Image (tube, rainbow, N blue to C red):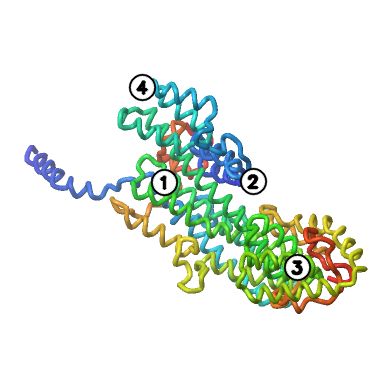
């Protein structure tokens, strides 16, 4: 969706720049590539992924025809077209460049080569933009996990980097802080497996285990209650966790009333500083919201 | 009479080389596209080049973010962060991201022009790649701004605002990820200052040399249906309908 908006925005600028030309050919090429760009990283469509050995029928036929007559220009151009249709711009450029030595003055070949090079540049560019967007989201989750003890953000970040020990540590700290020592112990254990020599983690694991064992069983019901409220709160948080809708619009977002529990980073990193709410998690895989557990106020 | 004509002819012949020097040649199409990135383009405020606008907006963003970072009132922090985000991510007002993306696009246009030098063709994708770091920071600023807008406590807003301050500064001056070198020493750490330097270095390598493109050329470059770029000799300012 975001990329579609970008296409429209670029269309607007492109139109401003090119409308005076009457001919929108260049913009059309740019926008056509941009319109397909979201597919490059978002969905594994044939056009998005140009994988060796899995060429569609059209490419296979065009390649076979070309290999029969490698000296002729027609089959070469057809192969390039088939490759372009599949988003294989790099391969198409290589096919056309190889033909340039044989047909250095052919206008159709040189024009097609220029166009495909342009598509390739745009594809690379859009890929970079999309990667930047994904990386920003990951960084955002990491920040919220480490600095705001936002467990949902920790979970999102760990989906991309499941063995990131600093993220695991931040999540375990956040769980301790929100009164889930049993879950925290499981996460500390995972982090410790990745860093067996880390004595600080070992100490935190011991503290979490001790607290989990001391937790009254009666609190499990309260924990389940808190977990049941999680989906609604997760939805609230996600309502503003997207790019492109404008920062100002979020000012009055309903999420304002469901903001995450805050904690100073020093608290999040100190398992012993977690409030002794007496809550415990029923399972290590329970999904938690970023709100305070029952019995605590935001 | 004949002598006068002969003298006049001799004078013309003698002056021809000098007159030739007075006739300015139009810039290459590639250089005009580069000019849109660094000098002027008719769609931006004050018709400034895209990278120039990006730098101006980055300075505005730093100013607003710094005010937010030192704020103690939740409402004030929200207002300043919103302004910082606007300077960074506004599309209509050419925020940092939009202006930079357009600069990248125009350098790419330059690279695909028929008269682009090998230097420009090689430099354009590098510039596009190196600009991604700034784009990523802009995206993160947008996400954090939404966090601030949804904050219910000053403390939570202050945490995000402090990050926004760092990001806006990095967008202009470059980042120092390892805290060991100076900011912007690696391409992944680049801010707008380093990106501008990269463009300047590309221009310095041009042969024949790049000369600042006259605004008439910058504002009257048009593309024909055939795909060929030409200058609109009627100087219609780049907003012509039905031009064939």
Q: Locate residue A229, reporting x and y percent.
A: 86, 59
Residue position for label 4: A72
Please, what secondary structure does the residue beneath circle 1 have?
helix
User: Residue reaching furthest left?
Assistant: B3
Residues at marks 4 and 2 on the same chain: yes
Residue position for label 1: B110
In the picture, residue A156 is in which quadrant?
bottom right
Chain letter for the residue marked with disc 4 in the picture: A
Residue position for label 3: A184
Please, what secondary structure does the residue beneath circle 3 have?
helix
Residues at marks 3 and 4 on the same chain: yes
- Depth check, mark 1 against mark 4: the one in front is 4
A243 and B240: which is toward the camera: A243
Query: Image check: B239 left or right of B2?
Result: right
- Compute the Cα span from label 1 to label 4: 32 Å
Q: Residue at x 75, y 74 (%)?
A: A263
In the picture, residue B9 is in which quadrant?
top left
Q: Residue at x 78, y 61 (%)?
A: A284
Residue position for label 2: A5
B49 and A63: which is toward the camera: A63
Chain letter for the residue marked with disc 1 in the picture: B
Q: Locate residue B138, reporting x and y percent.
A: 59, 60
Please, what secondary structure does the residue beneath circle 4 have?
loop
- Depth check, mark 3 against mark 1: the one in front is 3
């Amino acid at each position: 969706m975001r990329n579609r908006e970008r296409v429209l925005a670029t269309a607007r600028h492109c139109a401003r720049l090119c409308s005076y030309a009457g001919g929108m050919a260049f913009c059309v090429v740019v926008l056509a590539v941009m319109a397909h760009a979201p597919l490059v990283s978002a969905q594994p469509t044939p056009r998005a992924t140009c994988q060796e050995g899995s060429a569609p029928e059209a490419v296979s036929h065009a390649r076979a025809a070309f290999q029969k007559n490698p000296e002729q220009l027609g089959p070469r151009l057809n192969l390039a077209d088939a490759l372009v249709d599949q988003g294989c711009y790099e391969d198409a450029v290589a096919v056309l460049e190889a033909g340039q030595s044989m047909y250095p003055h052919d206008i159709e070949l040189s024009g097609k080569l220029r166009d495909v090079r342009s598509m390739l540049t745009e594809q690379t560019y859009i890929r970079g933009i999309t990667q930047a967007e994904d990386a920003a989201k990951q960084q955002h989750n990491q920040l919220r996990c480490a600095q705001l003890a936002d467990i949902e953000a920790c979970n999102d970040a760990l989906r991309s980097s499941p063995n990131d020990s600093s993220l695991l540590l931040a999540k375990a700290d956040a769980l301790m802080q929100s009164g889930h020592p049993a879950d925290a112990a499981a996460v500390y254990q995972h982090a410790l497996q990745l860093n067996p020599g880390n004595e600080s983690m070992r100490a935190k694991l011991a503290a979490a285990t001790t607290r989990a064992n001391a937790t009254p069983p009666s609190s499990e019901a309260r924990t389940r209650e808190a977990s049941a409220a999680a989906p609604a709160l997760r939805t609230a948080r996600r309502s503003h966790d997207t790019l492109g809708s404008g920062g100002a619009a979020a000012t009055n977002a309903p999420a304002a009333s469901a903001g995450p529990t805050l904690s100073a980073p020093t608290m999040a990193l100190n398992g012993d500083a977690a409030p002794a709410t007496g809550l415990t998690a029923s399972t290590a895989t329970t999904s938690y919201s970023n709100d305070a557990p029952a019995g605590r106020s935001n | 009479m004949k002598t006068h004509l002969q003298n006049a002819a001799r004078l013309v012949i003698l002056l021809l080389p000098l007159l030739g020097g007075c006739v300015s040649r139009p810039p290459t199409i590639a250089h005009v596209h580069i000019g849109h990135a660094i000098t002027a383009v008719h769609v931006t405020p004050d018709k400034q080049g895209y990278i120039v606008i990006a730098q101006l907006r980055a300075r505005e963003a730093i100013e607003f973010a710094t005010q937010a970072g030192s704020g103690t009132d939740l409402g004030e922090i929200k207002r300043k962060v919103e302004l910082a985000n606007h300077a960074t991510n506004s599309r209509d007002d050419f925020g940092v991201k939009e202006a930079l993306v357009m600069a990248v696009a125009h350098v790419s246009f330059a690279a695909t022009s028929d008269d682009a030098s090998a230097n420009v063709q090689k430099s354009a994708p590098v510039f596009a790649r190196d600009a991604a770091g700034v784009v990523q920071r802009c995206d993160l600023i947008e996400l954090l701004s939404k966090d601030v807008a949804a904050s219910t406590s000053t403390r939570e807003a202050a945490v995000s605002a402090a990050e926004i301050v760092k990001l806006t500064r990095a967008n202009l001056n470059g980042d120092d990820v390892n805290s060991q070198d100076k900011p912007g020493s690696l391409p992944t750490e680049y801010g707008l200052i380093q990106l501008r330097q990269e463009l300047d270095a590309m221009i310095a390598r041009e042969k024949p040399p790049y000369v600042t493109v006259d605004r008439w050329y910058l504002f009257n470059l048009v593309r024909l249906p055939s795909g060929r770029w030409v200058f609109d000799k009627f100087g219609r300012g780049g907003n012509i309908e039905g031009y064939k």
